Image (tube, rainbow, N blue to C red):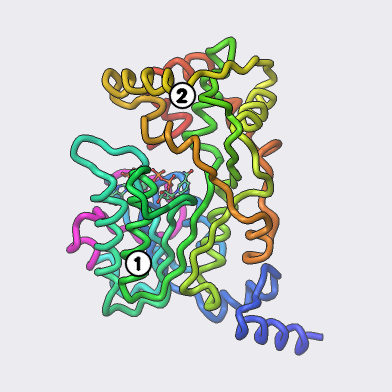
Amino acid sequence: MLVVAISDTVLSLLDGRHREDKFGLWVVNWVSNMLVLVTGATGFLGRRVVRELQDRHHQVRCLVHTPGRERLFPDRSVEIHYGSVSDPAALADAFYDVEVVVHLVGIIRQRKRLTYDQINRQGVANVVEAAKGTRLKHFIQVSAIGADNSPAYPYLYSKWRGEQEVIGGGVPYTIIRPSIIFGRGDEFLNALAGLVRIAPVMPVVGSGRNRFQPISVGDVARCIVIAVDRQDLKGKIIEIGGPEQLSYNEIISVVVKTLGKKRLRVHIPVWLMYLATLVMEKVQPRPPITIDQLRMLSIRNVAEPGVVEETFGFTPRRLEGNIDFVRSVGFWDGVKITLGSMPPHIRDH
Ligand SMILES: NC(=O)c1ccc[n+]([C@@H]2O[C@H](COP(=O)([O-])OP(=O)(O)OC[C@H]3O[C@@H](n4cnc5c(N)ncnc54)[C@H](OP(=O)(O)O)[C@@H]3O)[C@@H](O)[C@H]2O)c1
């Protein structure tokens, strides 16, 4: 039996069919146990990726942008390197002996002296450059569904240009494009919960029929870490989403239900919301929504159904039943979020 199990697993590893069986995982870890550099390790997704990598017995090196944030990993043995993706010298230092990089750094809001191009494209180019001439076996780039060669959506355009830096950079890569990601510490659902707490009706931009495929942060981390060992995914762009395609209206209903409330939806004309958002951007340091994000609410944000099962061998979690964390958003948190400040007990960075 043991011989059959071993040869089965080895065969599946060789032809890239390896899936999520425990014995297979043990063999993979025993064979690989690689040194993985995680950029953006202290972020919403990064901290889950670090945990998942450690659970699978990889050695982890974290690129930490803001000194002090490494506190997140107190009792776990990760190696810390400080630096920015805009600093090639710091990157070169961090790449010593690295076999895999999971590049997660990305910004979804531009600031005065921090543009999408600087981080989402040039930052990627710098990381690719640092990887050249090293022992790197796999470059995992986290992009976003909708990344496209059209400047009409500046965030998605910058993510597409970041992908091009990876593809043209001569590194063995896999690009993963998640749909909207939910989980403790996310911005999207916590902001919606804040609105439910303070508003007697739920404002919806336009028809609210646009579809998303929310995927849990733990499931995205799991896909990324499975990809680390998968030869058959090299050279591919994989779009991932949760098990359901939900309209914006349906997502709101799930949040309202989870909070045990009832709210009527009020549909606001897109032009009026633009006007309100323009004003918010002018007067608030960190508006709850930006013009870019508002525009992205109207584009389809879904993957092919079943991709996670077929490619990564597990079924991702549904939204409903897995967002209890929104209950920790109180009335005053809702007020703060709407005024442009995210309470640290909800999102700590
Ligand atoms: N969240 C989503 O719904 C979603 C959906 C699709 C795709 N994605 C993509 O997934 C990736 C991770 O997103 P996330 O939600 O985890 O973002 P996040 O929570 O904002 O985390 C970003 C991380 O990048 C670090 N960082 C920022 N600027 C840096 C710089 N110049 N040099 C080095 N590190 C820097 C941040 O550190 P500091 O906080 O110390 O600056 C933080 O650790 C991004 O590429 C994003 O585009 C996210």
Residue 2 higher or lower than 184, as above or below: below
Q: Secondary structure at mark 2?
A: helix
**Label 2 to label 1: alpha-carbon separation:** 36 Å
Residue identifier under label 2? 270
As rendered, which of 332 and 144 lies closer to the eye? Answer: 144
| Tag of residue 63 | none
The residue at 56%/24% (across/down) is: 193
Question: How many numbered marks are there?
Answer: 2
Side of 174 where 91 appears, left or right: left
Q: Quadrant of residue 111?
A: top left
The residue at 59%/46% (across/down) is: 216
Please state the horizontal and vertical placement of residue 208, each as a whole percent of the image. Answer: 58, 29
| The C terminus - image quarter | top left
71 inside magenta stretch: yes
Please state the horizontal and vertical placement of residue 237, each as a whole percent of the image. Answer: 49, 64
Side of 9 where 203 appears, left or right: left
Sequence-wise, which precedes: disc 2 or disc 1?
A: 1
- Are the two marked residues, 2 and 1, in contact with CB atoms closer than 8 angstroms? no
Please state the horizontal and vertical placement of residue 296, each as a whole percent of the image. Answer: 45, 38
| Tag of residue 166 | 1
Q: Residues within 10 Å of mark 2 (few under 14, many from 20)?
A: some
* Residue kind at label 1, given as amino acid type: Val
Q: Quadrant of residue 133?
A: bottom left
Q: The magenta stretch spans which residues?
A: 67-92
43 inside magenta stretch: no
* Residue kind at label 2, given as amino acid type: Val
